[in-house]
Image (tube, grey):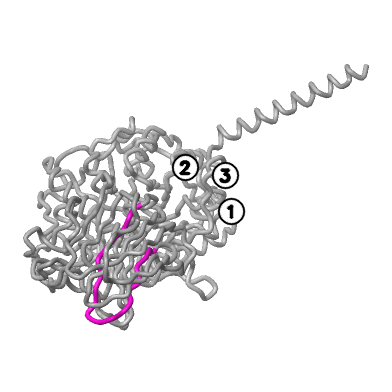
Amino acid sequence: MKKSFLKKIAAGLIAGVMAFSLAASVVTVTNPIYASAQENELTGKNALDITAMMGKGFNIGNTLDATGGSMNDIRAHETSWGNPQINKELMHGLKEAGFNTVRIPITWEKHVDKNNNYAITDDFKARVKEVVDLAYEEDLFVIINVHHESWVNRSDLDTAYLEIGEELKAIWEQVADLFADYDQHLIFEGMNEPRAQGTSIEWTGNSACYDAIEYLDKLFVETVRANGKGYNNERVLMIPGYAASSNPSVLRSIVIPEINGEPATNVAVSVHCYSPYNFCLSDAQTTFDPKNTNDTADITTLMSNLKTLFLDKDIAVVIGECGCTNSGNNNDARLKWFTYFGDITAQYGIPAVVWDNGAGGTSGGECHKYMNRSTGESLCQDLIDAFVGNVELGDTLINFETEDGSSSVCIPSELGFTSTSLNCKFRVNHTEDVKMGFALKVESSEDDFTALLDITRYAGIPVKVSAWIRSDAEDQVSVGIKDSAVTEMAVVSTSDEWTQVSFVVTPAEGKSYIYFKGNNETFYVDDILISMDTSDASVEGAGGEVSEGSDTGTGTTDGTAATVTGEENAKKVSPIVIVLIVCGVIAVGAVAVIAISSKKNKK
């Protein structure tokens, strides 16, 4: 009797465990977001942290943002502009191609009941959630927005913003509630390209239009933060200027909203860049030369403005749309553009999201197709590789000169340097004949002797870093890694004798730099070698003096400092590695060209 009773208890327990296991299994299958959140939860980051992780992205354009179909058929709406429904094959293909972010433009208006407090239909909310879940399953960052809304892009935008705001607030209240439990991988973008459509100022705006956008941006941020649920208090929120334009006047008009008298946190500026316009959005120009300032001026001006207006103030930026049309199969020119634009946005630490509308033609200015939407197959992997930086890593040697030593002037940013104190290379070199080459000259800028070299491409990979350093007088130069913290690897006692420093380090994920920082004297850096061979962290030599550095931060950079010495007139390191960048003679003081992002609707 007891045994029978125990057997019944055991059977009941087994059945309960099996039922519980089955229930847990069902939850995991039907709600993959929860499993993903538990394994890869992203929380506690600020907007700059998030944008540093986003990398390059892909717009699934002309799909959920299409305006055809009817309120009663969400599938017909999604395919009404000729693209297939978004599926898991596409999301997987995007991840495999090298993208780390997906922007999902969404037009809500056909699925909103204006007579019922702008309620979004349940079936459309479910479909949007389904698509976001597909992206989460691939561990992608996701941007969702309010896109081709006729109630936003009104010709009377400058006076109708209060009425527009009612619907904008209602939409984002519901979206914030729907996705409250989605972590910081999900980003909200308040509006796409809000503008006075059909007017003479559609793409330029005026002060009244700028004020209207400022009001709507603030309303969007306040609405999401007021939700207060889940991750909405820390979610990154993207706000555009008028028409998301790169026009300097528009950029200067952008105001970070205040909440309770303080600038709202985790807000990123959204801007679009199709520059140069005649190349990117028309067939008027079919070539692009990254060495021609006529082709690059709009881009470099935009980057400079974004840095001055936002990045220097610790305000994050996302280029939510960019790209260049296929004009007569001009793939060589497009490859140059994607290489240039991918590199320069990486140098500034700005994530960029390429526009894809599924249009596979070769004329008309709107041919932006990079993926097979049905199968997830990449159709232009060479362009994608150039854009996202899918290059095979190897050793990098930066020696500041051409092989014959004839190069005399360079722009440091073209070598991956970021510093206000760097202005040119200097005719000095640690070879037997000092007239044969050049080195980097680091001068004081407001008592700051610092140079930063971007090594983000080596994130997570152990590398050996070496460089030659000297100064005009006795001084000390510290060398180390700057990522989320500052890690000093070595301190070099410098003089007019060349000293070589070397250490092994694993750069952290996100933006990462080698820094060279002096105290009081102008100093020089030459032959910077980043090697994949970390078997020997020390270099033999005689002369200079190097001491091991000490950590000054709490970053994840993991380094091994080496005592390295130098010698006067030392022989140059054998040039067995590829010199990535060769600077020719470049004229200093190019004329700046104002970038005005004038473009048409991307249907």
Residue under the point 23% across and 47% down: 386
Mark 3 crowd level (few <14, some 14–19, many ≥20, 10 Å Cα): few
Frontmost residue, 585 versus 127? 585
Q: Earlier in the sequence, mark 2 or mark 3?
A: 3
Image spot of residue 257 (x, y percent): 45, 69
Q: Quadrant of the C terminus?
A: top left
Secondary element at tag 2: helix
**How much space separates mark 2 and mark 1, taking CA atoms?**
17 Å
Q: Which amino acid does label 3 sit on?
A: Gln
Mark 2 crowd level (few <14, some 14–19, many ≥20, 10 Å Cα): many
Is residue 383 on the magenta stretch? no
Residue labelled with disc 1: 230
Residue labelled with disc 3: 38
Residue labelled with disc 2: 136
Up the image or down, 534 lies above or below 20; here it is below
Stretch in magenta: 463-482
Secondary element at tag 3: helix
Mark 1 crowd level (few <14, some 14–19, many ≥20, 10 Å Cα): some
Is residue 475 on the magenta stretch? yes
Image spot of residue 202 (x, y percent): 26, 61
Frontmost residue, 456 versus 32? 456
Residue under the point 31% across and 82% down: 520
Please state if 568 lies on the left or on the right of 67 as rendered. Answer: left
Please state if 587 lies on the left or on the right of 181 as rendered. Answer: left
Q: Earlier in the sequence, mark 2 or mark 1?
A: 2
Up the image or down, 187 lies above or below 427; here it is above
Residue under the point 35% across and 38% down: 96
Q: Which amino acid does label 2 sit on?
A: Tyr
Residue 269 appearing in the image: no
